[in-house]
Amino acid sequence: MSQYTSDKTDFDGLATQDRYTGSRWKVLVIATDERYMLMRNGRFFSTGNHPVETLLPIHHIAQAGYGIDVATVSGGPGKFEWWAYPKDDAATRTALDATRNAFRSPRRLADVIAGGLDDYAAIFIPGGHGAMNTIPAHTDVRDALDFFLDGRLIITLCHGPAALLAAGVGRDANPFAGYRIVAFPDSLDLGANIDIGYLPGQMPWNLGERLREAGIEIGNDDMSGATTRDRNLLTGDSPLAANRLGKESVLALLEEFGS
């Protein structure tokens, strides 16, 4: 775990001092509500959403003046990989303090959709292996993505792009086919992550493999902190990308929804 965690992040300030000063626009965070991933060998991996990949982008977005709402598929509490929490990091602590209750008592995604998504400028699906559990196969996630594909922003990183698979549920083709993203590389989940004991076995399915089968292009084969944007989809490859993706997300939000 020490090879993937640190007491502090690389937060080095905000992308801009500009802020959204209105009251309408918010960002909808879809968190995982599942703690465990059942591996192919029958063992369980204690997972959830990675705290750096979740809280650091949220910090940037909230500091830029955008409201944050949290939803899960079931309406149950969002789960964190607490063993990866950077205990000495002020930015993630600020974001956690501001959203703790929202993660403990999130809205049910179906209820958010039924109530209307018009006031959400973006959807954010954090990383962490837990994002691979229920989210990629759920029709509520598909329906939310449909809305944000049309003129809004979609932000995700690491294993969070698994959510893009939901867009193809019940369809002949995935509407994200042809999009180019960066994501956590299969080579690490199939190799080093098992070898060093980070994962207790092979995952039930492989993220990059499944995304490519859906026609989504992956532009990285390593973990370097890379980010990319294709149309309205912003992605990052790992926790190393969380700070940069947060900054890029804020600049994109201010450009599109700054008034």
Image (cartoon, rainbow, N blue to C red):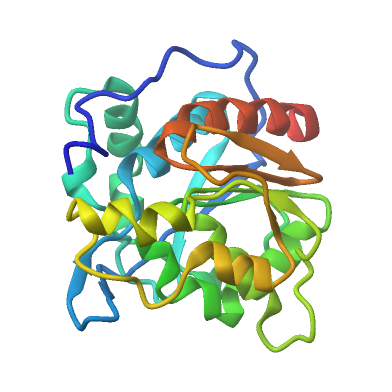
For the residue pair 105 and 250, the one nearer the viewer reads as: 250
Where residue 144 appears, as percent x and y from the top left, is 65, 67
**Which quadrant is the C terminus positioned in?**
top right
Quarter location, residue 110: bottom right
Quarter location, residue 141: bottom right
Number of numbered discs overlaid on the protein picture? 0
Image position of 230 (left or right of 22): right
**Which quadrant is the N terminus positioned in?**
top left
Q: Against 246, is 192 above or below?
A: below
Where residue 18 appears, as percent x and y from the top left, is 65, 14
What residue is rendered at 22% in x and 39% in y?
Answer: 85
Quarter location, residue 75: bottom left
Image position of 188 (left or right of 40): right
What residue is rendered at 24% in x and 60% in y?
Answer: 199
Where residue 249 appears, as percent x and y from the top left, is 63, 33
For the residue pair 9 and 97, the one nearer the viewer reads as: 9
Image position of 39 (left or right of 252): left
Q: Is residue 189 visible?
A: yes
What residue is rendered at 37% in x and 20% in y?
Answer: 10
Q: Is residue 106 visible?
A: no
Where residue 147 appears, as percent x and y from the top left, is 75, 64
